[in-house]
Image: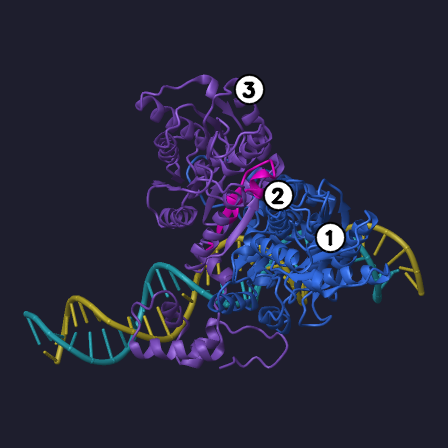
Chain colours: A blue, B purple, C yellow, D cyan
Amino acid sequence: MTMSNTGGRRRPPTIHDVAREAGVSRGTVSRVLNGGHYVSPAAQEAVNAAIRKTGYVVNRHARSLITGRSDSVGFLLTEPQERFFEDPNFNVLLRGCTQALAAHDIPLLLMLAGTKDERRRITRYITAGHVDGVLLVSSHSGDPVAEELREAGVPLVACGKPIGLGSKVSYVAADDRDGARDMVRHLLSLGRRRIGVVTGPLDTPGGVERLAGYREVLTEAGVGVEERLIVSGDYSRASGEAGAERLLAQAPDVDAVFVASDLMAQGVLSALRRAGRRVPEDVAVGGFDDSPAATAATPALTTIRQPWDRISNEMVRVLLAQIGGEDPAAVILPTELVRRDST
Amino acid sequence: MTMSNTGGRRRPPTIHDVAREAGVSRGTVSRVLNGGHYVSPAAQEAVNAAIRKTGYVVNRHARSLITGRSDSVGFLLTEPQERFFEDPNFNVLLRGCTQALAAHDIPLLLMLAGTKDERRRITRYITAGHVDGVLLVSSHSGDPVAEELREAGVPLVACGKPIGLGSKVSYVAADDRDGARDMVRHLLSLGRRRIGVVTGPLDTPGGVERLAGYREVLTEAGVGVEERLIVSGDYSRASGEAGAERLLAQAPDVDAVFVASDLMAQGVLSALRRAGRRVPEDVAVGGFDDSPAATAATPALTTIRQPWDRISNEMVRVLLAQIGGEDPAAVILPTELVRRDST
DNA sequence: TTCTCTACTGTGAACGCTCACAGAAGCATG
DNA sequence: CATGCTTCTGTGAGCGTTCACAGTAGAGAA
């Protein structure tokens, strides 16, 4: 069943070779390749046999040249800092997208646009039509790239709701607010009443929404929101540690902390340990993400699972739909409370 | 300086438009695009001006169709398990390669070949010439993909020395053995004499080499190698924890442990803590990789830094050279001891 | 002058594919 | 029998580029 490739790189078979082998015309082979409509069963079979025999693989460059499509999509990361790349969530997302695309036989082009220069070059590359669409990952708002691409008419799906532009651009996001609500309700259900929070950066949708959920639940429960219980971080471990120290200083009576990311929660655990507080006996700690950091922490973190596999699948689905001509869409996916040892 | 794109996606300018604008022929424009040899300064200037004015970007599909090159390279990951994707080193590598390639204006196609099916499809895709070369990342040996690609004549650079195939395939690796030697010498210099080791999987070059370095130094120092001090892991945190427990059982008098990865070292630290051993007072612990896990650990890990940025740069350099017709090459890069709190 | 050489430029022919169109065959309908 | 409709098939054109080749102009040598 080996293809007759007797050593040495030789010219790969073309659609012509297949046509000759199958005794049909190029047109018929092309039709078989593109869905097989208006092709007789006999021809269909002959062409498929010829493809197998010759080991033919379509030349995507030739195809793209005429169709104008590239049959590939870009995965664009517009982050100046390396931090995001260290975020374990990113891995899962990238992996999920690659696989979801592979199911459609679409390769993924990884693009990093950290500096301004790179951003310009990549925008150019994309708008020139070298990819059919873009999966955009950038946590911070005010990203000019998204706006530029949208204006250029490039199909685009963001991960997380872009703050700047309204409903013009598709996005897929976990329900941050609802997740935060679940966690705070959980902490309340444990009898905690002085629940602190270490928020994410407040120029990101996640940072804003998770804090909003926290406020809502405390207000609804009649416990009330105290500003001294609120500190901000930037999702990094170090900022979690610093945040916890500030929190302990401002509110020594704190009996629970909702931390807006697992990585920060690790920092919070360190700070609490150093301060001699036991977790969860003295202070219960809840994270967010359910990243590997959650299970690596001691004690293992109770956290909110983001459905990354579903997020990546949905991003790809929405992007392909948009490439196919559909309108932009927003998808919000539910989160899940994962109970471990820190609460 | 905006290009005259008055709203709405319009047909992008071609080399023809540029030629007309500059008052020269297609051929001259093409020559300018490809290095500018045999072009008069006047024409050169006119063409460049026309390119700026029209906002021309070369159509890579048309170019690839005729040149047979794709001007893109694949980053191939052949790992069944997701673990590798969680490995922080992977991030750095992927990121470094993307950037190194971006400097040459070459996009990177990310390919995951976990299952057998995927592997076959991707091999087919690659051998069909859709990428000019492949950066291969697969920790375990006996990978059939590498052999297949090599046979098909696809330029290939592996990360880490592939165990199966000899010197036929290029690779770039850190000097695992030397790194291990440095660490063990460091532990000896602290006065430790009963130095245990938790190795990596022994079907990976890293696993084998790091253990070899350990043995060499102990032998050279006249301390001698005791088999009860040697246990194996699989680079995962859990296996580090299990390994440390076995080690403590077999050799309760152990006063230092060289662990072949930071992630495993985290596990070792947990196990030691649970056993009531103080680090570094009772047992010194040395890791390998200098991954984020090293600084996240408590105490912060003394470890061996792998020069990931240089590794990725070298991989790209060697691959491009090979695409350019040069012979395969092996590059071994030095490591560095990073001293922290665990020793 | 005439020839040769070099530096430069333009032109047709590919590359491998899809698309539009023309046409053939089969079958039902008028 | 003509007409229309549907299903199927082959053919030429062309996508935007590079490449090989032919050709031009100018400089220097015979």
Inspect the image, locate mark 3, and give the three-letter code of the amino acid beneath it.
Ala
Image mark for residue A37: 1
Looking at the rendered structure, the secondary structure element under dot 2 is: helix
Q: Quadrant of the C terminus of chain A?
A: top right
Inspect the image, locate mark 1, and give the three-letter code of the amino acid beneath it.
His
Let me know if marks 1 and 2 both belong to one chain: yes
Percent coordinates x, y for residue A118 in the rendering: 48, 65
Q: Chain of mark 2?
A: A
Q: Are marks 3 and 1 in contact (CB under 8 Å)?
A: no
Circle 3 residue: B249
Q: Is residue A267 above or below residue A209?
A: above
Left or right, B140 with reference to C20: left
Residue at 69% across / 62% down in the picture? A230
Q: Is residue A335 above or below residue D18?
A: above
Percent coordinates x, y for residue A175 in the rendering: 76, 57
Q: Quadrant of the N terminus of chain A?
A: top right
Magenta stretch in the rendered image: B70-91
Q: Are marks 3 and 2 in contact (CB under 8 Å)?
A: no
